[in-house]
Amino acid sequence: MSNKHSSPNLNTASYLIDVEPVEKIISVLVLSLSLAFNDIRNTFTFTTILFCIMCFVYVSIPSIKFLIGRMYVIIPFILFSLFLPFLSKSGSIIYEYKNISIYQGGLFEMSNILLKSTAGVAMAVALSSTTSQFDIIKGLERLKFPKIFVSILSFALRYISVYISEFQRIRLSMKSRGFNNKGLSDSRSLAYAGSAMLIRGFERGEKVYSSMIARGFDGNLFINKKKWNKSKLLYFLCSVALITNIISLSL
Amino acid sequence: MKGGISINNLSFSYPDGTKALNNISFKVVEKERVAVLGPNGAGKTTMVMHLNGINDIQSGTVSIGNEKINTVNLKKIRKNVGIVFQDPDQQLFMPSVYEDVIFGPKNFGFTEEEIEKNSKEALVKVGMYDHKDKSPHHLSLGQKRKVAIATVIVSNPKIVIFDEPSSNLDPSSRRELIDIIKSLDSTVLLVTHDIPLALELCPRTIVLKEGSLLCDMATNEFLKNDLLMREARVELPFGFELHHEIHHIKNEDNDLLNHKHSD
Amino acid sequence: MHVPDGFINAPVSATAGLISVGSLWVSTKASNKFLGDKFIAIAGMMSALIFVLQMINFPIGAGTSGHLLGGALAVIILGPSLGIVCVSIVVIIQALIFADGGLSALGINILNISIVTGLIGWFIINTWKKIFGEKNFSLILGSFVAGMLSVVMSSVAFVIEYALGGTVSVAIGSVFIAMVTSHFLIGIGEGLITAFILNLFLKVRSDLVFISINKESRHKTIHLKRILIFLSLSLVLLVPFASTSPDGLESIAKEFSFDNSENTAILLEDYSMPLISNNFISIILSTILGVSILVVLINLYLNLTRKNP
């Protein structure tokens, strides 16, 4: 089990760290959605939005290497897209070699998928590099997400690290008793460890609830106020994206 | 609300029928410090959870400062009876230390200024003010325990109950814990297996066994009584003997001092 | 599998988003009613657990390992409303905080990974209970089937979304075969792990397992949820065709003046579905869709007319 989830890196060098989480979330949403639902053949719109995204990502991440390291989630889709010029039989045939033909439509689709998925991941990485997990949740709260949902998200985040540590301890004790993690019967043992954790999870949930009511909880939750900066750059990027979208839709 | 506790004929059974508490009665005076000892499963935690209304009272009565606990005054009771649970992860459920500490005061209706002032005082008292923006997950057990205490004392409760506060603590964290408890001005109930802790902090000891009250006497007396100790499944740490009587005296600043008196 | 940005077009993504929001809203209300003040603590805890469970590498043999999706397991243990809420929370956390799954595809991912798996799992385990009884052994077997089919239907849901709004013109037949066969294997893994986990639960704390304690209880709110979801699902069929702006593929066809009669979007006439070049596959898909709708309808009818003891 990798440790990638237990401490996502905050890029302290980025000035966006002190910017209001709401602005960052909205920027990410506006830019991701704009890019995802436009086509590379609307060249002007697409490249403008792509450029906005690159600005945002550039200001947020520490290095390109960091970003590439986080791209592993879309590797299967990248591989799939590389086959598209051959598989996707749309558009005219550009090139033919023996039995294999490359389709023009397929090439465009490949570029679409490649650019959109990588840009999408880059945006999400940029967001998590400049905003701590809980600040993202607070941003959602200020965006008037239902309070119940926000609280559940907040609790879930708080206890994910607890359970990761707990499971690592369980695995350690399993390993010291000769566990190899190879065959199907080992899956069974892991599943049992997982269910033990789930059972304890229920009990812990009840205990946390007891703690909450012991400190007066009666169903109402409070918004926390903290001072944040505003970012002119983000306003600018979002406006550009929105305007280009509107222009392209009306044409 | 004053800080006295009065439990009368309290009994409690679990949903599956097992009897956890059997007709328990005792009184605690305001600002008194009482240790609650007993083997695992004796019902100590179950009893304690009645004191702030988490466990419903099935039979008997529980009064906090002359007010009987009922369905109406629960919030007031909980403001005045703080419990520091054994597992700090259960108690620290907010994203940051600061938010955990202000959780109680916000629910109890403190004003913004009070919240800021009290939370700062509480965190300084436990020595964790510099960590106020940290996530609880990144703290050591001793630090978590201290923050858990802060989350309770921030509301200035008249009664503070500790459930196994010193378990798994290294000696210096344990000493810090003792200093914090000594500096409290409230009634203190200390559920513990740590005999020296009980002796240092509490003049009076209650022992529970299998849901019933075994004895209720001065800690000094209890620890000299081998028969009772054996019945309570309690023993002094290896190599220790009680030579002196420990007197629990408070000076003008209400700090607890322990003076040794030889017989 | 978490779908990234760019695979599914706007109308279908938006519809999926609407369905997800609607279902989440209903599930949250139902869970809140069911759990009361405890809802936040329990849901938070269980979501965290499902998240961590999804990270575990379960070895299958020959050096490969699989992962748990958990949709069926969640509804079996937590009940339909809470199960769907928890897995949705996990998907949201993964997309928003861990960059797993495109934000524009969040609606689709929630729909496929939590709602489809949850509903299918719930439907199967309940039907299995009625047919084969409620003994532990039968429940465990049922959970295997529920886990397996939930994953397979999740991939079918993706294929349907692709058929309606995929931005890529790979033949739907190939997509169907690729997705469903690979998810069949994943489904077997999911079924096995679900069964293993339920096994221990039933041995140790069967009082916590939703399906074994709630024998005949049916909340009216769950009926309402099903009706809402059914209605939204029908929207899926209507929206892409009602949309007047041409979707990506049509615009490609127009731009290149390519006479692609096989791939233009047509309404559901003669049992064929849009963007499908192979009629045989389209007939199968339509049948599956039709049968599923019928099954949901029948189930709804049975539940609404059942007398509560």
Image (cartoon, helix red, strand yellow):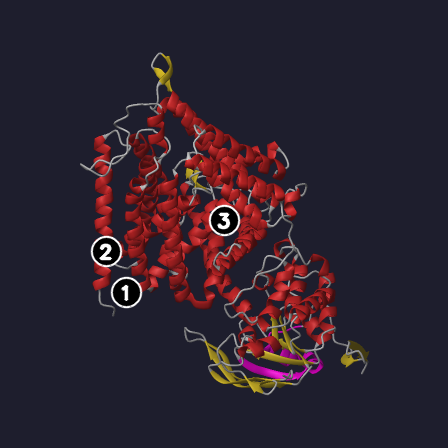
- Give whichever of A250, B199 is nearer the camera: A250
Magenta segment: B212-235
The quarter of the picture where the C terminus of chain A appears is top left
Residues at badges 3 and 1 in contact (C-beta under 8 Å)? no
Q: Which mark is residue C216?
A: 1
* Quarter of the rendering containing residue B189: bottom right
Question: Could you tell me how far apart the alpha carbons at marks 3 and 1 are, in whole angstroms?
Answer: 34 Å
**Is residue B222 on the magenta stretch?**
yes
Residue at image mark 2: C299
Q: Badge 1: few (under 14), some or many (20 or more) residues near its Cα, within 10 Å?
A: few
* Secondary structure of the residue carrying numbered label 3: helix
Chain holding disc 2 = C
Q: Is residue A165 above or below residue A43?
A: below
Q: List x then y, in percent, for residue B175.
A: 74, 66
> Percent x, y for residue B22?
50, 82
Q: Amino acid at mark 2?
A: Asn
Amino acid type at mark 1: Glu
Category of crowding for the residue at label 3, using alpha-carbon neighbours closer than 10 angstroms: few (below 14), some (14–19), many (at least 20): many
Give C90 or A89, whichever is nearer the viewer: A89
Looking at the picture, how far across and down is residue C180, in whole percent? 32, 37
Q: Do marks 2 and 3 both belong to one polypeptide chain?
A: yes
**Dot in front, 1 or 2:** 2
The CA distance from mark 2 to mark 3 is: 33 Å
Q: Is residue B129 visible?
A: yes
Name the residue tied to disc 3: C93
